[in-house]
Amino acid sequence: MIAWSIRRLVQACFVVLAMTVIVFVGVHVIGNPVDILISPEADQAERARIISNLGLDQPLWRQYGYFLYDALHGDLGRSFVFNEPALKLIAQRMPATLELAVTAVLFAMFLGVPLGLYAGLKPDGFLGRAIMAGSILGFSLPSFWVGLMLIMVFAVQLGWLPSTGRGQTETLFGVPWSFLTVDGLRHMLMPAVNLALFNISLVLRLTRAGVRETLPMDFVKFARAKGLSPARVIFVHVLKNIMIPVVTVLGLELGSTIAFIAFAVVTESVFAWPGMGKLIIDSINVLDRPVIVAYLMMIVLLFVAINLVVDILYMLLDPRVRLERKS
Amino acid sequence: MNATVEVRNLRTHFFTRAGVVKAVDDVSFSVSGGQVLGLVGESGSGKTVTGFSIIGLVDPPGRIAGGSIWYQGQDLAKLSEREMRSLRGNRIAMIFQDPMMTLNPVLRIDTQMIETVLAHARVSREEARRRSRDALGMVGIPSPDERLRAYPHQFSGGMRQRVAIAIALLHNPDLLIADEPTTALDVTIQAQILAEVQKLAVEHGTALIWITHDLSVIAGLADQIAVMYAGRIVEFGDATTVLDRPLHPYTHGLIGSVPSRNKRGERLRQIPGMTPNLLSLPAGCAFRMRCAHADVACEAEPPVEPRDGRDLRCCHPMDQAA
């Protein structure tokens, strides 16, 4: 177990290191920030001064060396645009995205698993079919459109929920959070549902497939032959077997919901949610290299951490994995 | 002796889209405490469905369409699911064919045993654990205390089947239905399990229904034998009577198909043809397509008649034909 943990940690370090190279080189390929940052009226001397200030006059390998050295000291550079530490910028936006993503994944878990379970147990019933049909919509409707429709119906027509912003926040560990106030929760509900829709559909289908696959197994019939209650058969014998793939997917979902701007940024834009998605898109537009690099580094760390947690959950859920790891 | 379970004219049908599959069609037999009934037949003959009918685990689209299963003055076919559940695993238990699949891979042995105890007895967890440990010891599993904390994948096939048997015997059932429990095992393990189950059944006065396609297994074990073909019992009587002087051509063919009876170099005997499709059973005797003695008389459904110390469903018994 300890040997395994150390091996995993070393692995994780190499992944992060490899990512720094890829990200650093990649960001330098997409364009020169000097063209955007420096006003066309600036003369040659001023240009040279700014470039050397930003450290862009150094060769790439030296820039990377400085970056790595600073990164090891907890400094991921200063934003060209805001002239603030990139890490601070991200840290300011992170909680908003984090709480939204976590809420969405919780929705996926607490709605997706029960719905999938029901659809798996009653595949021919009306409700079971309706759930499956609904999940196709959840997959295929573009999230910006669903977001707009949600705003149209619940904010504009019915006026039940606020359409934009984080609402009232409460400070915890020096960070403002929306989920601690009723108003904040009301603001969070729609974007979270919008984000969760795809995840719910995915988890639901996965759970249903698992149920359909597990129910005909001999051990389920044997559990019934033992005279166990249907609840025990389903929630202990069937569900525990299904949870292994579901946990994997939920972990990946959490990571991708936070990281992949494809989801987060659209939802964050539609609901004017001040999260990281908006920051990274703006930074890419103005080629604010330190922010992009810092953001991607955070995401890599997040993914590595989530994968580690998923692996540990795996071991808790599946005794066969546990044995392999020991030997 | 009073029968523990008496099955009368049982019909279990599967109502599929393609038509009604009469998996069990007019089956009657009884078995008493301490006795072993061997239920023999090819795959698809309805033996397993008969077992599931008794324990009330026929899955849709199948259901018991007629007949009765008498146990202690009540008809199991008419009990509610809740009443049936209180008997299942308690008074009537079942073990399955493939021990690799019968235990839940992600739950420890103790979880799977204790839940069975607690499902039917109001005892503390410690008491349930103690009973589970004793049951494991009873079926010959060494150091049961340690093994309780193990997972199924840490056991061999034979050991897993022993665990399944221990679970089935936790409540000293009146009836144990064993559905080919040794077919997936090595011959040596098979012999051990057979001896073990036989001993336990006699000790506890448990009635045993042993479902198998293997006559050599049943020969030394069963007191009575019921031979099934296409959902019907074609021959039912004392084991020695049926095995020594089979009257139904199908029983005769089954016995002839046991390889050990062949002389060296001789071509293995077999029953020609295949088991009929239960969706399109011909009228009359279901075996007549494969039977050497079939004639016009077989196109009418043969009735069950007592003959030479057994119940027989055949117009041309072997003693007559020979």
Image (spheres, grey):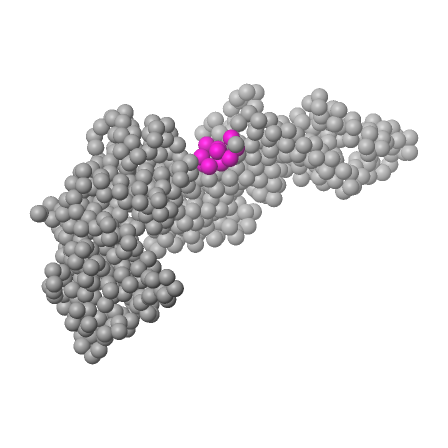
Q: Is residue A5 above or below residue B58?
A: above
Measured as percent of width and height from the top left, residue A235 is found at: 35, 39
Q: Quarter of the image holding residue B287? A: bottom left
- The answer to whether residue B100 is visible is yes
Measured as percent of width and height from the top left, residue B73 is found at: 9, 47
Of B300 and A57, which appears nearest the observer?
A: B300
Name the residue located 40 percent from the left edge and 35 percent from the top edge. B151
Magenta span main SS: helix
Name the residue located 28 percent from the left edge and 54 percent from the top edge. B216
Of B322 and B212, which appears nearest the observer?
A: B322
Q: Quarter of the image holding residue A133? A: bottom left
Name the residue located 60 percent from the left edge and 30 percent from the top edge. A8
Measured as percent of width and height from the top left, residue A155 is found at: 48, 42
Asked if residue A1 lies left or right of residue A12, the reply is: left
Q: Is residue A216 above or below residue B305?
A: above
- The answer to whether residue B111 is visible is no
Question: Residue A315 colored magenta?
Answer: yes
Asked if residue B1 lies left or right of residue B56, the reply is: left
Measured as percent of width and height from the top left, residue A206 is found at: 46, 47
Q: Quarter of the image holding residue B293? A: bottom left
Magenta region: which residues?
A: A314-326
